[in-house]
Every structure is written in C-alpha cells, then in structure tokens.
Amino acid sequence: MDVSKLIVEDVKSGTFRIHRSSMTSKEIMDLELERIYETSWLYVGHDSEVPKQGDFCRRTVLGRPLVMIHGNDGKIRVLINSCLHRGALVCRTDRGNSDSFVCFYHGWIYNNCGKVIGIPDPEGYPEGFCTAERTLMSPPQVDSHRGFYFVNFSAKAPSLADYLGNARELMDLTIDSAEILGGWEVMKGTCKFDIRANWKLLLENSVDNYHFHTVHKTFLDFMANERKRAGVPRSTINNITNSRALAFKHGHVAMLTLAEGRTIACPNPTWSKDAIAEVMRIRERLAERYGKERGYSMADYSRFVIVFPNLVFHDTQSGFKLRQWWPIAPDMMQVTQWELLPRGEREDLVNYRLQGGVTFQGPGGFGSPDDIEALESCQIGFRAPELAWSDASRGMRREPRSDYELTSRAFWREWSARMQGHAGAKRVVDPPIPSTNARKQVAK
Amino acid sequence: MQPPPQEHLLLRLAVESFLYEEAAHLDNWRLDDWLALFAEDARYIVPTTDLPDGDPKRDVVFIDDDFTRLKGRVNRLKSRHAHREYPYSRTRRVISNVRLTRIEPGEIDLEASFVVYRARAEAIAPYVGIYRYTLARTNSGEFRIRRRRAELDLERLSEHGAVSIIL
C-alpha cells in the first residue's frame, strides 16, 4: 500500500480526489492510529467539569482509561486510571468528589493528586518500597488552552500552543465571547452515540455547508414555519454567500457562517422584544470590550472549528458544543458531544439557546440524525470497490466559501502528509487561483 | 389516597389499554392519530443516557418537545426528507410493569418498562428503559398525554446512532 497515492490533487485542472480505501481499510485505520492519533493533541475535558478540589471525571482517550482530577493542592491533573500494582481501575465512577481512591483489587490507596498514600501489609515488600514516591502515571504530555485540557501520547510532539497555532484565534473568539457572562461551563448530560461510518466522514460533514440545504430540509422547513407563526418575514441572511472556509497549519479547518439566533449575540427575530434587546446589549458590550471588528465577529458568525484530528468546536445557533469522535473500526466511530453554557446567561436566553440546540443537534434533533444517515449511506456506497474515488474538487479555484470543500481538501492534505510519516503538510490551503489570463490559457 | 383495589385494577387496565393503543399507532406509523392523544400543554422528553433524571431546563437532553415541536417532529417524519426514517424503520414496542404512581381525580402519573426495537439497514437495535407519563382525563373520560418521558437504561446509543423514531 502506497499511502501517498490515496489523494490525488491536480492543481492545473482544479480537481481533488480521495481514494475510498482510506475509509474502508483496516490497515489504513491502524496506520492512522499510529501516525496521527498517537502523535496528536487529543481533547480530554474542561476545567469547569472539576471546579472544586477533589472533583474528578473519567474519560476514555484513544482507548486509555483516564481521570481528570482537581487535587487538594489546587492543581488539575490528567492521570492514567490504572493501579501501579496490577492495573485495575483506581477510579470506578464517572464523576464525583473524593480525597482518596482505594484500588478495590488489593487495596492500594491514592490521594487526589495521584500519590500512593497507603499499601496494605507493607511488611511483604522490600525495605523502602512502600515509602518510595509513587504516583499514578500521566500521559507523556498534558496541557490546557484556557481551561480546555488536552493530552498527547507522544513526548516528541510539538507543544499544544504550537499545535493549535492560528486556530486558537477562532477558538478564542468563542471563549472570550462568554467572559462578560462569567465564562463557559460544561452542562450535565452528554450525548454518546455511534455512527456506522468512517470517522473522517463526520469530520468533513462538520465543516461542510454544501449538504445543508439538501440534508436538512425538514429542519429548515420547521424553522421557516416558526418564523411564519411568529409573523416574522423570511430571513434574508444567506449562510452560503455570507460564509468563509479557513484552513490552518497542522490540519485544523474551520467554517464561519453569518447566523441569526445566537444568544451571544445575534438575536432571532422570533424571540421576545426584551430578549432581543438584551442580546443587542451583549453584542454592543462585546464591541466595546474587544473592538468593533472582533466583537461583532464574535457575535454575528457561527463558528465550526475542527481541531485535527477528532474534535469540533461548534459555536452556532445550536449553542456551544464540543464533539469528539474515535475510530473503532474502518466503518465505525464512537461520538461524544458536550454542551457549554455561559455561567451568567439570563434565564430566558438560556431557554432560547437550549431550545435552539435541541431542535437541530444531537441524537434526537431535527438535523443530526439525517447527517448520521448520510454518513452511513456513504459508507455502504464504499462497498463497491469499482467506484474507487470520492470527489472533493468543489470550489478549488474560487474564493473559499463554506460550501466549497476547502475544509475537506485541507484536512486530507494534512492527513496524507501525516500518514506518509511527515511532520505535516507543506501546504494545507488551496493553490493560488490562476489569474484571468492563465484561466483563458487553461481553457484553450 | 389509594382507591379500593378493584377500582385501582380497572383503572390500571384502562391505562394499559391506552398505552397499547398508543404503541399500535406508533408501530404502524399512524403519527397523526398518535399526536391526537396529546394535550396542548404536553411535553415529550428523552434525557441523555448518562443523566436519566436530566431536567431540560438546565441539562442537556436528547429531546425536549413542547406541542409545537412535537407537531414539527411528526410533520418531519411524515415527509420524505427525514432521511434517517425514509423509508420508515420497522419498530415493535413491548410495554410492561405498568404502575400507577399518583391518582388524582383529573390526572394520573404512571411508570412502565419498555423495549422498543428498531429494525433498519441491516441492524436491529433495542431501546430499553422506563416511561414516565402524566395522563389527564377529559370530561368524557378519555386520556390525554400531558407528560411523556422515556428514560433510557443504555449507556450510549450504540447501534441505534440516534433517536430518530418516537420512543
């Protein structure tokens, strides 16, 4: 297998193809785990999930059982949830608060900083064994960006700050936007579901606006009906022409779309007058604090930011959600979705936010189930090896709109480079658009 | 106040009949008939699998429909564009362990165990859990659903992928 041949980019004709074996081969998936997942920064959790000393929550990250824990020394740690003695899980509940953890197998005791503080019947061990410093292991690299904790299982990988690079600016727009409301807090209630499709299909789907009007017609019809019922004229906002796609070093990609119905801070005209006034006040406060350009951009645009390879920051009319996926088999992924809420958001706005979220996104929404159907449908289509290639050429020679598949191409360029064992792609963005003259020459 | 045993039994039978008729509407995709069983102030809620007692006012839930969105859900499922349910999956509901937990003159709370099988696209996925209903009784003696909560016992939606059918 020559992984360098799995994507074919023809700059001259402006075409881009992906070999479908990348979505069906076990060999390729194993290589993805080794060359991409084992060396990338992977999201674990948010500090608001462990606000008090002793708070902990369990996570499975790349198969590893981890626990994120707020120690009595005030430090938040991410530890491997496995007893140093024989390996049993030290923490056996998904969340809670505790000063110590007793391994139920042989009774080794750990404090909430991970340190061994007791070994039963110490006489059985050589001298010094039980007094030696022993602590639960951490993944080779653990770091956080403004409360969002990530791990990296490769000690050689670049720092989190370098890795996120300029994608941080987009993440920060969302993070900053809730500062005046007390910052973000992860809500209780997690959406956990599987999709019988290759993980990369969900990544692409999360930043693809081309499918929106076909896959999500029933959602759009419902929303249009709601406006009609409220006596509000049809929206004049076009989320395709008022949109942008972006690509960053290390394979992070994003799409921005102009959007009504954001409680921070671009109201839906169907909301109460009072709610609309409050949202407009928040919008102005953002402009005052962060400057007009940055403040209004925070308020008016929905942001879909992929942190390569398996996380999406999703700040939209459906609220602020994080969604993470894991490859289980070439045709199977596990998905987890969390939602965050500004701590001090007014109750009526929280209600609009949550109603917006539950209407579209998540396993019971009017949107997500149809996305899942589309991905599973593609995966079944891939069973015909005669049709070996998928096409991602759309908009390759145009200014990047959110429906122009730049996000896919940029992701696949990075994917290809990493799969070949390179540190990253030389170029993730599309090649420069040829001038009019050059275009005429191509036409000849 | 508990009514006399015989009266209680008859009431439970009436409630069970109502639940079975409701299940028949859903298994046969008679969604308009199903919607007609609801009171205008109704709420249909499906919490997430990790927080079965989730409160939609402050927690993430899978589904939190008031009557408007419930109507929207039915309209959506009736169209050819609810792709996850076009063509319709086959469903089979098994309802049991019905217990009346509160009996008032015009209103009854009940719990019932359910298994809802969904068969489609080479897989059959059972949704297992408990229903919590509040039924209103109209002047003519008919039941109307005021609250319908389906709490799942699953740890995650694995082969189900979503809750695209009515649970």
Image (cartoon, coloured by chain):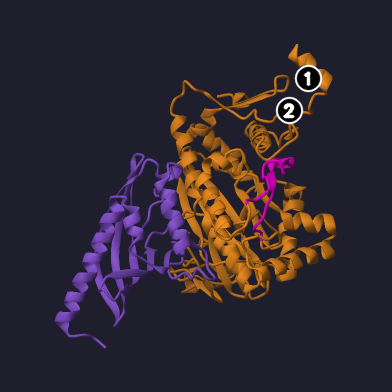
Q: Quadrant of the C terminus of chain A?
A: top right
Alpha-carbon distance for marks 2 and 1? 10 Å
Closer to the camera in the image, A127 or A282: A282
A102 vs A57, nearest the viewer: A57
The stretch of residues the image draws in magenta is A234-262
Give whichever of B155, A28 is nearer the camera. Answer: B155
Q: Which mark is residue A397?
A: 2
User: Is the residue marked by circle 1 packed among few (<14), some (14-19), or many (20+) residues within 10 Å?
Assistant: some
The local secondary structure at tag 2 comes to loop
Under mark 1, the amino acid is Arg
Amino acid residing under circle 2: Arg
Give the percent coordinates (x, y) of residue A86: 47, 60
- Which disc, if any, is residue A298? none
Q: Which residue lies at the image location 77% right of the left edge and 52% below the top edge? A: A169
Vertically, is B53 above or below A216?
Answer: below
Q: Within 10 Å of the Cα at label 2, are there few (<14), some (14-19), or many (20+) other Cα atoms? A: many
Circles 2 and 1: CB atoms closer than 8 Å: yes
Q: Residue at x 70, y 23 (%)?
A: A14
Query: Can residue A113 be seen in the rendering of this structure?
Result: no
Identify the chain drawn in purple: B
The residue located at (46%, 48%) in the rendering is A194
Is tag 2's residue or tag 1's residue first in the polypeptide sequence? 2
The percent coordinates of residue B73 (x first, y second) are 44, 54
Q: Colour of chain A?
A: orange
Residue position marked by numbered label 1 in the rendering: A439
> Quadrant of residue A48 in the image?
bottom right
Horizontal side, residue A438 vs residue A123: left or right: right
